Every structure is written in structure tokens, then in C-alpha cells.
Image (cartoon, rainbow, N blue to C red):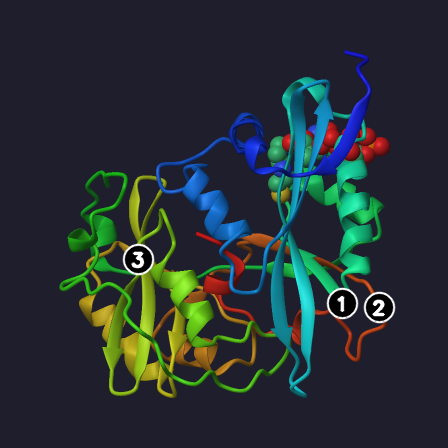
Amino acid sequence: MTETIHIREFEDADLGQVLEVLRAALGETPILRRTPALFSWKHFRNPFGRSIVLVATAGARIVGVRAFMRWKLRTAEGEVLQCVRAVDTATHPDFHRRGIFSRLTTEAVERAVADGVDLIFNTPNPRSGAGYLKMGWVEVGTIGVMARPSIRLLRRQAAVEPPEAEEYLKLPIPVGELAMEDRPARGLRTPRDAAYRSWRFQQHPTARYFQIARGSSAAIVRPNVRSGRRELVLSDVAGPDPRRVIRETLAVSRAEYVAAWWSEGSPERAAAKRNGIMPIPGRVALTLVCRPLRTLPLTVDALSSWDLALGDMELL
Ligand SMILES: CC(C)(COP(=O)(O)OP(=O)(O)OC[C@H]1O[C@@H](n2cnc3c(N)ncnc32)[C@H](O)[C@@H]1OP(=O)(O)O)[C@@H](O)C(=O)NCCC(=O)NCCS
């Protein structure tokens, strides 16, 4: 395999081959099928803008793909940073360790700089993580898991995939319009406006989200199967009363446990803990890394500078 590798921008006609490379390199699960609809939701219908997508070719064959998804983060002072998330990177297994990921990423960074992007962030796996650190990314820290088990964990029955909402919630109500104003950012925070919430929780092509609303607040949850267990992912909370809607979520959950994550110091994390959803000691779900593309008004490589929820970290 000595063909010359070329890097170019993604074209619509590449989609089938790009999905093949992603499947071959990353695999898929019943709720994360690498369908054209999922790719288009992430990279073309995202309210923050169209992704930077590059491909590597060997002759007519696509052998690598690299996408930077557009994002925004608001600082505690109210400044909005133009960001990209380095997601969906894969090199076909036949072409590993030939520098394709590094070349694609370096070129995508150049395009991001030219577009005025302030910050790149992502949650890589160990293989690509090593490559990012070589290319100037810095580690921010690790994201854990908060969970509260239910008595159902003891009466375990094999969960089916894709998950049936009725097995997770007494009355599953799909997420509707969430018009609540977002609370002020405590650190780098995804601004949750109506367009973002609709795209993220109503228009997702494969994952299904439900709401538990009380008063002017709502919890947003996603039924999931993890290791054969029914997990209710508490993705986010909208509105001024997280404690009440989290309590209500636990009351209506039929899952074996509820899982969540919020940054330290956030009102949602405090509300979750008051309801018995506790950090699991030593459990690491994700490692957050980032690369500032200009001098920023805050220290980005410390977790204390971020204000995150599970729902804006994972893209399911
Ligand atoms: C991770 C992946 C994209 C790397 O692609 P690649 O084109 O082989 O990577 P490169 O040749 O540019 O490697 C660049 C650096 O990344 C790191 N790296 C790449 N593959 C690695 C591996 N299997 N184990 C450890 N480090 C690895 C190394 O630091 C490497 O530098 P080196 O070759 O000088 O040691 C590729 O292995 C892949 O497609 N894996 C499956 C999909 C995946 O995991 N995507 C990342 C999702 S977050």
C-alpha cells in the first residue's frame, strides 16, 4: 500500500464511503447507527453551523475522514467563543499509522484558524488522544459518572435494544418545546437556546429523548441499555428548579439506575446530589482535551473553567 494520499474537502457524493470508513474504524451500536441521517444531523443541520469535513483519498478510495463540528461556548463573563468539536475521525484499518489522522487534523486546524475559531475541544479515546496531545492539544481533565441505583437493579431482566420507553418511564412524553431561558454560565457553557434544544433533543435521528416537566422546569432523559441494564440517562435540566424535576425523574423512572453528569459547583450537580445521584468514585467516562487557537480570557485547561452537562458532552 504505497499509494499517494491526498486530502480534500468532503463532497456530497463521498457520504457512502465516509460512512463505510467510520463503520470499519469505529463500529456502531443499535442507537448509534452511522446512517446518512445521523451524519447530516451532526454536520449539516447543527444550529451552530456546518462542520469542517475533510477526507483522505488513495486513488478513488476514501481512506480517512476528519470532521470538526461547529459549537459555541459562553464564558461566565458572557463572551461567546466560536468553537469546533473534533469528532468523527477515522482512518481505514488498512491505512493506520501512516500519518493520515495527523495530516487531516492539521489541515482541519488550519481551516478552523482561517475561519476565526477560538477553541477546539473534544473527548478522544486513548488511541486518538495520544495523537491530539502530540499535535498541541492539552488535557483538561476527566469526566466521571454520577448515578443512583434503584431497587430494580436487584431484579435484573435482560434489557432489549433499542430501548422501549415504557420500560423506563411511567408516562414517556417526548421532549416538546423547551422555552426556558438558560441560566447564566458559570464557566464555559453551551448556550441552550430554542434552536439548540430542538436540534439536540427533538431532531436527533436515532436517540429518543423524553421530558419530565414540573412548573417551569423540565428534566430531559434518554432511555439507554448499558451492559444489559436499563439506564436512564439524565441528559440535562432546563429551568430554575433542577432539584424538583430531578426528584420527579427518580419518582417516575422504571430504569435500573439513573446516570448523569454535571460540573462541580453547578446548581444541577448540587440538586442531583441532594436527590442521591452521587459521583461514582474512580469512574472515568470521558477525558476532555482542548486546543485554544488564540489567547483566551480564561484558563481552558482546568475543569473548573467548564460548566458541562452530560447532554452537551455526548452527542447521542
Ligand atoms: C485513531 C486513528 C484515527 C488514528 O489514525 P491514523 O491515521 O492511524 O493515525 P496517525 O498515523 O496519524 O497517528 C498519529 C498519532 O496518533 C497516535 N496513535 C495512532 N494510532 C494509535 C494507536 N493504535 N495506539 C496508540 N496511539 C496511536 C500516535 O501518537 C500516532 O503517532 P505515531 O504514529 O508517531 O506514534 C485510527 O486508529 C482510527 O481510525 N481508529 C479507530 C477510530 C477511532 O478510534 N477514532 C477516534 C475516535 S475519538
Q: Which residue is mark 1?
A: 118
Residue at figure coordinates x 67%, y 25% from the top left? 63
Residue 304 at least partly seen: yes
Q: Earlier in the sequence, mark 1 or mark 3?
A: 1
Is 213 located above or below residue 152 in the figure? below
**Residue 29 rendering spot, x and y as whole percentages:** 40, 36
For the residues bearing labels 1 and 2, Cβ distance under 8 angstroms:
yes
C-alpha separation, residue under disc 1 versus residue under disc 3 = 38 Å
Q: Quadrant of residue 94?
A: top right
Do the numbered discs 1 and 3 sit on residues whose CB atoms are within 8 Å?
Answer: no
Taking 258 as reference, is 81 left or right? right
In the figure, 138 relative to 303: above or below? above
Classify mark 3: helix, strand or loop: strand
Which label belongs to residue 294? 2
Residue under label 3, please give it: 257
Q: Earlier in the sequence, mark 1 or mark 2?
A: 1
- How packed mark 2 is, by other alpha carbons closer than 10 Å (few <14, some 14-19, many 20 or more), is few
Q: What residue is at 31 percent from the left and 59 percent from the top?
A: 209
Q: Nearer the viewer, residue 258 or 2?
A: 2
Q: CA distance from mark 1 to mark 2?
A: 6 Å
Mark 3 / mark 2, whichever is N-terminal? 3
Q: Quadrant of the N terminus?
A: top right
Circle 1 sits in a helix, a strand or a loop, which is it?
loop
Q: Secondary structure at mark 2?
A: loop
Amino acid at pointer 3: Tyr
Q: Residue drawn 69% across and 73% down? A: 81
